[in-house]
Image: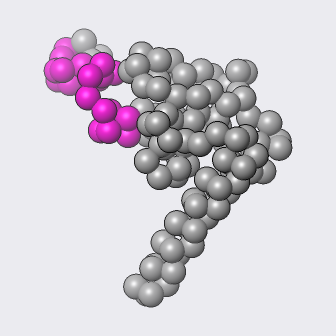
Amino acid sequence: MTSDSESDEMADKRKQNRRQLERRSRSRRGDSISGGRYRLFGGSESPYSMKMRAIMRYRQLRFNWVQITPDIRRTLDRDGPPVIPILQLPEDASLHVDSTPLAYMLEELHGGRSLLPDDLQSPTLQN
């Protein structure tokens, strides 16, 4: 169990890591994540990466596709296993993984073209 001060320190470290990532990304690529564009890191051979590309296109969300390479992966300051796809949010440059939770997160963040039916209790969905 962590104390409140330890939790605050961990949150501060995550914020600092995000800022470092954003600075590094801008300096290496000469671009920024401004303008409300997501950055989707993935591989063309990954079905989950292709799933996220399809979701982003269907939802008509602005994003840049970044084909992941070992060099790019090293620039991503992310704890956890080396999985793809990785979605970088435009608001804070935070990194998120796992295509199904990402799809639900985008549902919460954006109105418009939903992936979910209006009636979740539909008999069609129950089978």
Q: Identify the residue at horizontal 26%, vertical 29% (top origin).
A: 111
Q: Is residue 72 left or right of residue 109?
A: right
Q: Observer-nearest residue: 96 or 19?
A: 19
Compared with 109, 5 (above or below) is below
The spot of residue 35 in percent (x, y) is 46, 36
Q: Observer-nearest residue: 78 or 27?
A: 27
Q: Is residue 56 visible?
A: yes
Compared with 61, 72 (above or below) is below
- Which stretch appears magenta? 105-123
Q: Is residue 79 magenta?
A: no
Q: Identify the residue at horizontal 58%, vertical 28% (top origin).
A: 64
Q: Is residue 87 visible?
A: no
Determine which quarter of the picture holds residue 29: top right
Q: Residue furthest right?
A: 71
* SS assignment for the magenta stretch, majority: loop
The spot of residue 92 in percent (x, y) is 47, 52
Q: Identify the residue at horizontal 32%, vertical 39% (top origin).
A: 109
Q: Observer-nearest residue: 90 or 48?
A: 90
Q: Is residue 36 left or right of residue 28?
A: left
Q: Identify the residue at horizontal 57%, vertical 72% (top origin).
A: 13
The spot of residue 57 in percent (x, y) is 47, 17
Q: Is residue 111 magenta?
A: yes
Viewport quadrant of the C terminus: top left
